[in-house]
Amino acid sequence: MKNIVLLNGSSHPRLAQRISESLGVELCSSKLGKFSNQETSVEIKDSVREKHVYIIQSGCGRVNDNLIELLILIQACRMGSARRITVVTPLFPYSRQSEKSQKKRLPQHQIGSEIMNSLSQTAGEASNPIPQGTFAQSFMGMSVGEGGYRQWCARAGTLVANLLQAAGADHLIAMDLHDPQYQGFFQIPVDLIYAEPCIIQWIRSEIPNWRQAVVVSPDAGGAKRATSVCNKLNLDFALIHKEDVGSTKESMGLVGEVDGRPVIILDDMIDSGSTVGLASEILKRHGATEIYAIAVHGVFSGPALEIISRSPVTTVACTNTVPQEEFRSQCAKLRTIDIAPMLGEIIRRTFHGESVTQLFVYDEPM
């Protein structure tokens, strides 16, 4: 492959090396570090002039440092006259800080009345540019706190998208965004890819009795992802339903039958581990024999590994969008699903202008 440059940041060098090996393309020589005052230092030692540069940087570890490093790498390539710059972020930075939905800000039964209140309060007040109603304020990213003080909610997703574009990125490749609305924040092409083919392959090869299993979504938001796997593997589906009880408590219940069968909990991210821990306890009480948990992004922050170790979960499998070596040394239940070959193939296809969607067309084995 000529006129292609693979450039890796410091967030996940092992993944970048695996992608390089799968493509048969050497990584671009660079020097990444910090000055004595802790400012990020970037030096690209190979020429990128008139080449298509792929910058591989995941939003993990020291996220803020890695994000700034990514922006400087993009700018350095732009100043080096790169023909095209594609950012490959297996885990998109700040992907959990999307704009809050209006349904979470406001109870459903109040929406109609709040629309009227907002309209009536803003009518005839042209001199006041800020709507006063709660419903109107929800669209502007603010809420009213005690004493009438307006508390503004930062929109980190929009900010990160604008920063990447301002730095000079031409194209973005991201895997399993925590909130799909991020794709709409960009004015450049975005290829949203999925780890589903790798997950399905892992289920077929690593779970002995997978044909009898039930795929479980730990919340309503992940139901679409879980049902997609169910349909491709012809498995049954169950859902753990969360319901708010009061202002501080949640009630969780199971919809579906898992008694006497293995279950596969499918989620996009394991961060604190609380969702997997609670879900596994509920499934165990309902008679599940073996409990497997699969997530695309294994962040494992705080007490996550301790929660998983004490939970009834048999095995937890995550892709290597985040480095997993240190986590696996601390928890024997963890397994890793390698996505490097798939990312390498996606890079090859985008470089040659081939279809990426065809990778996610599932053909059932005979």
Image (spheres, rainbow, N blue to C red):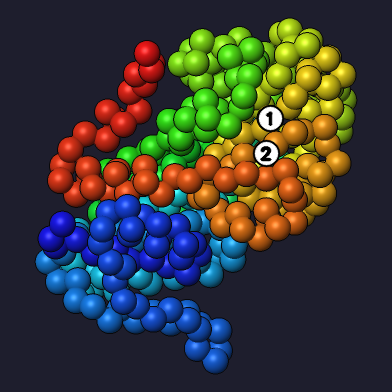
Say what amino acid the circle numbered 1 marks: Tyr
Mark with earlier residue (1, 2): 1
User: Which quadrant is the C terminus positioned in?
Assistant: top left
Residue ID at (74%, 48%) = 332
Please say if 42 is above or below 366.
below
Q: Is residue 354 visible?
A: yes
Q: Quadrant location of residue 50?
A: bottom left
Instruction: Measuring from the top left, give residue 90's x and y in whole percent.
Output: 45, 49
Camera-side residue of 49 and 39: 49
Instruction: Measuring from the top left, give residue 34's x and y in whole percent.
Output: 50, 84
User: Which quadrant is the N terminus positioned in?
Assistant: bottom left
Say what amino acid the circle numbered 2 marks: Val
Residue occupied by mark 2: 316
Q: Is residue 224 visible?
A: no
Camera-side residue of 325 and 295: 325
Q: Is label 2 in a helix, a strand or a loop?
A: strand
Contact between labelled residues 2 and 1, with CB atoms less than 8 Å apart? yes
Residue ID at (78%, 18%) = 288
Residue occupied by mark 1: 292
Q: Could you say which disc has been placed on residue 280 in the image?
A: none
Residue ID at (24%, 69%) = 78
